[in-house]
């Protein structure tokens, strides 16, 4: 079955592009990525720091049902344009992955639908390829499905 | 004449690497990149914001002799490890260039010499190639010569 969240990754490049169309107004799609009380729900994480503004920074972690931290990540918001664009750094802590640069673009399609484009640039081709070997596409697709469900209730 | 600051840029990649060996202890080389009163001297710019720490941010500008702003840039420090490493974003404002991700690595060679490696990752190959067409190598080499001169007086 074709996933709704699509990943495009050209061979030999240190970047990839992720796209997803949501049945959500662009303002709600943007909120889902910037309001900590929403981010925490669809990503299933705990927010440790969240300064949603230009030159702000963030950190979150996820824990297993027993409360053990499985994953922690942090970064900075380089750019933050309401309902349009977020540029940030992203680093998974305590892993061999290095910092990556992420461009999120939010586009209105109709009053009720919108498109997210995530362009991710890695430090090397090898790191990009390693990321693609993780169950990353399926995980993100599931998270985006949760986003759609949770946020559409706010309409 | 071979420039002391060397730029290596492989065809078809969206990254480049810059290296320079300085006759400076690594601690002074790091200070030259992090203390605003030194940065401003060898880069010839005016510092508007400078939070030299993990998740801090910065902004600077350069002006012509008449005081007109020629160039302004800003970004965030993703990582900041004393005498070792800085990872930051960098964006020239009001230009077609997009944000780039910069990794600065500082290495001790001897007590009196050290090496700077800058690894810069661009949003696209085209942007990297555009940067290489600017008088960028000569400019950075000159700035690094000033750094060497100014900072060696602090020894």
Image (cartoon, coloured by chain):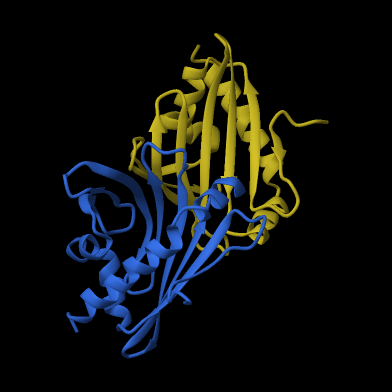
Chain colours: A yellow, B blue
Give the residue at x 35% y 86%.
B113
Q: Nearer the viewer, residue B87 or A31?
A: B87
Vertical placement of residue B70 versus B19, above or below: above
Give the residue at x 35% y 48%.
B75
Does residue B151 appear to the left or right of A15 in the view shown?
Answer: left
Residue A147: image x %, image y %? 57, 27
Vertical placement of residue B91 versus B115, above or below: above
Does the rendering let one see residue A69?
Answer: no
Give the residue at x 37% y 36%.
B94
Q: Residue A12, located in which quarter of the rendered image?
A: bottom right
Does residue A121 appear to the left or right of A9 in the view shown?
Answer: left
Residue A121: image x %, image y %? 57, 49
Residue B121: image x %, image y %? 53, 55
Does the rendering let one see residue A26?
Answer: yes
Residue B61: image x %, image y %? 26, 47
Total tally of numbered discs in the picture: 0
Does residue B26 appear to the left or right of A24 in the view shown?
Answer: left
Q: Nearer the viewer, residue A117 or A73?
A: A117
**Residue farthest toward the top in the current orientation of the protein:** A111
Q: Nearer the viewer, residue A126 or A69?
A: A126
Give the residue at x 40% y 25%.
A82
Q: Residue A125, located in which quarter of the rendered image?
A: bottom right
Q: Nearer the viewer, residue B137 or A118?
A: B137
Vertical placement of residue B145 versus A55, above or below: below
């Amino acid at each position: 079955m074709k996933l709704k969240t699509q990943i495009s990754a050209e061979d030999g490049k240190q970047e990839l592009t992720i796209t997803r169309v949501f049945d959500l107004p662009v303002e709600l799609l943007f909120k889902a990525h910037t309001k900590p009380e929403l981010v925490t729900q669809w990503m299933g994480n705990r927010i440790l720091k969240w300064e949603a503004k230009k030159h702000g920074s963030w950190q979150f972690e996820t824990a297993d049902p027993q409360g053990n931290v499985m994953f922690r990540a942090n970064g900075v918001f380089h750019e933050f344009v309401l309902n349009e664009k977020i540029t940030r750094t992203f680093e998974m802590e305590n892993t061999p992955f290095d910092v990556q640069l992420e461009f999120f673009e939010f586009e209105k399609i109709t009053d009720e639908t919108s498109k997210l484009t995530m362009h991710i640039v890695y430090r090397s081709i090898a790191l990009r390829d390693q990321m693609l070997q993780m169950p990353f596409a399926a995980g993100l697709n599931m998270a985006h499905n949760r986003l759609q469900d949770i946020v559409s209730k706010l309409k």
